[in-house]
Image: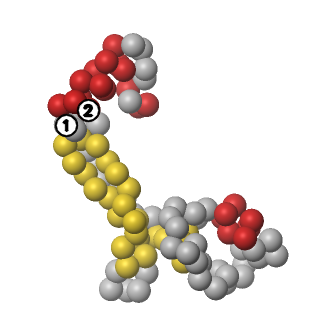
């Protein structure tokens, strides 16, 4: 469960909600000011050439918030750092 808290902080999770609202139960409506964020599909991309960044959720026409993503090309310096980390033996999915 992805959430925005009453102060607008994102991402927040169910544990954050429970810390702020200890009596809340999952079958109840969200406490005042908490907003549910609907997951969205992660854009497919080549990790060797592109990086994916999660942005602040967007409010859609259906008055629901959805995850937002930014996909951009890796810069030359980022690519050099990536290659160095891979050559040091770090797994590709962590680089």
Q: Is residue 44 visible?
A: yes
**Residue at horizontal 28 percent and vertical 56 percent from the top:** 70
Q: In the image, 31: left or right of 49?
A: right
x then y, percent, for residue 61: 33, 86
Question: What whole-number distance in Å separates the C-alpha atoms at marks 2 and 1?
Answer: 5 Å
Q: Residues within 10 Å of mark 2 (few under 14, many from 20)?
A: few
x then y, percent, for residue 12: 57, 63
- Residue 62, by quadrant, is bottom left
Q: In the image, 66: left or right of 7?
A: left
Q: Quadrant of the N terminus?
A: bottom right
x then y, percent, for residue 65: 43, 76
**Residue at horizontal 17 percent and vertical 31 percent from the top:** 76
Q: Residues within 10 Å of mark 1 (few under 14, many from 20)?
A: few
How has the structure been colored for display?
A: secondary structure
Query: How many numbered markers are drawn?
Result: 2
- Residue 67, by quadrant, is bottom left
Q: Which of the two residues, 42 or 19, is positioned nearer the viewer here?
A: 19
| Residue picked out by circle 1 | 75
At mark 2, the secondary structure is helix
**Residue at horizontal 22 percent and vertical 38 percent from the top:** 74
At mark 1, the secondary structure is loop
Q: Is residue 67 above or below residue 21?
A: above
| Residue picked out by circle 2 | 78
Q: Mark 2 and 1 residues: CB-CB less than 8 Å, in contact?
A: yes
Q: Quadrant of the C terminus?
A: top left
**Residue at horizontal 22 percent and vertical 48 percent from the top:** 72
Q: Is residue 48 visible?
A: no
| Residue 84 - label | none
Q: In the image, 60: left or right of 26?
A: left
Furthest residue toward right: 23
């Amino acid at each position: 469960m992805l959430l925005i808290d009453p102060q607008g902080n994102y991402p927040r999770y169910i544990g954050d909600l429970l810390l702020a609202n200890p009596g809340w139960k999952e079958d109840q409506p969200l406490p005042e000011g908490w907003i549910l964020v609907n997951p969205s599909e992660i854009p497919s991309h080549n990790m060797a050439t592109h990086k994916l960044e999660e942005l602040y959720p967007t409010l859609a026409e259906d008055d629901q918030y959805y995850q937002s993503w930014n996909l951009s090309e890796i810069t030359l310096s980022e690519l050099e750092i990536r290659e160095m980390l891979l050559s040091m033996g770090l797994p590709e999915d962590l680089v």
